[in-house]
Image (cartoon, rainbow, N blue to C red):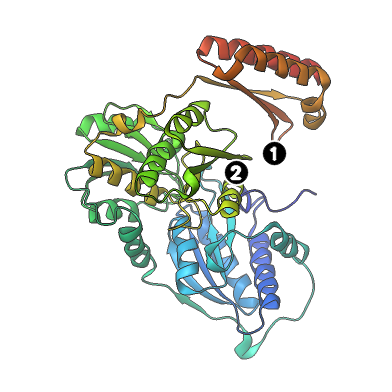
Amino acid sequence: MGRLFGTDGVRGLANAELTPELGMAVASSAARVLAESDRSHRPVAVVGRDPRASGEMLEAAVTAGLASAGADVLRAGVLPTPAVAYLVGELGADLGVMISASHNPMPDNGIKLFAEGGHKLPDTVEDAIEARLYEPGSRPVGVAVGRVRELADAGERYLRHLRVAGAGSTALTGLKVVVDCANGAAAELAPEAYRRAGAEVVAIHAAPDGLNINDNCGSTHLGEVTAAVRAHGADLGIAHDGDADRCLAVTADGDPVDGDHIMAVLALALRESGELVEDTLVATVMSNLGLHLAMRDAGIAVRTTAVGDRYVLEGLRAGGYTLGGEQSGHLVLPAHATTGDGVLTALRLMARMSATGRTLAELASVMVALPQVLVNVRVTDKATVAAAPEVRDAVAKAEVELGDQGRVLLRPSGTEQLVRVMVEAPTRELAERIGEQLATVVAAAS
């Protein structure tokens, strides 16, 4: 059996792979592990969820698991993932539990855990929780059983935080924004946050019914937000995913602005204000070479990490840096959030537009993305194939051909028997040709 925890908690098909029994066991084990690490008080946990239907079932299971292990539970209801992380820190709670499968389809769900301060759990703690999942032991009784209460002002607390951490003193007056809420956790809060900051807001896909989350909308489907921006004559569009830890944007002309472009814009803003620690940005190896070139020209260093927000977070903490993220729109501003926050990112992006008087297209033009081709090659043994001499030789030959005008990234998938071949080059034709050549070599080595 593989490790239960992935790069972003426990995830699977709700009620099949991710059952109420498993949810209760994970929550109970987490509470026991935390209680043993600090016996000075009974643990307090904040529990939130996105609006998908299975979240109701899993919320009940998680709440029961926590209380049965002696933890008090603050139920925050439907909230974005970063709101739960924020509340853990703001309330001094010991644990945060977010029930969400982020951008995944409605039938999936997941359990994300946050430690004290709203930080993601280290691998050692996740391993301890997994090791004790079904360990027999006595349960608390009487007054030692955990209590459950509603955190009625959870959303308002988060909105007050965003008002300061987001646009701050920069009013968004005069900006018209279309926000695609993905029928997700930010359907009410994101439009309200932008209105409070002064923007005129047109909200779409903001009527979650438990079944329509991420359904042809949100950050994985930019078609409708693009059409709405044009139809309403908006200055920009913002697209979130189901739990609103991501943010992608669209210009007034309907051109997409991905996480790499947003990082470039915010990095320059932070450097200008003297907040970009060591003039350094943290990004994953999947960020476009165009980001590296733009930052190099601006005198900003880019530190790269493995793919996954947890690795970005590790990189940020290691250097005490102030901005990092992924091409997918998952950006982290550690001075204001302990995890990716799509609403905070959007507020910062719009504040930059207001402060400079420049359009999003003008701001994003600081970076020119190189054509990028990604080929997934199914193999029998991904690790062996990726390390094969003929594959390494082919990669080296491609790198010589591209020189400093492109790059090759070949890596095994983290979850499937796939080798991912990514090529960036000055032209799409060259990227496609080299990508096909490398994919052929990878397939032959399988």
The circle on residue 336 is: none
Q: Position of residue 377 (x, y in %)?
A: 69, 23
- Of the residues shown, which amino acid type is indicated by label 1? Gly
User: In the displayed image of the protein, which residue is found farthest to the bottom?
Assistant: 143
Apparent side of residue 419 relative to residue 74 in the rendered image (left or right): right
Residue at 63 percent across and 90 percent down: it is 142
Residue at 78 percent across and 63 percent down: it is 131
Q: Position of residue 101 (x, y in %)?
A: 54, 49
The answer to whether residue 320 is seen in the rendering is yes
Q: Which residue is mark 1?
A: 414
Against 44, residue 211 (above or below) is above
51 or 4, which lies in front?
Answer: 4
Against 150, residue 214 (above or below) is above
- Locate residue 283: give its quadrant: top right
- Locate residue 25: give its quadrant: bottom right
40 or 106, which lies in front?
Answer: 40
Q: Position of residue 209 (x, y in %)?
A: 40, 51
Q: Quadrant of the C terminus?
A: top right
**SS category of the residue bearing label 1:** loop
Q: Which residue is mark 2?
A: 308
- Of the residues shown, which amino acid type is indicated by label 2? Gly
Apparent side of residue 4 relative to residue 168 in the rendered image (left or right): right
Residue at 66 percent across and 70 percent down: it is 28
Binning the other alpha carbons within 10 Å of mark 1 as few (below 14), some (14 to 19) or many (20 upward) gives few
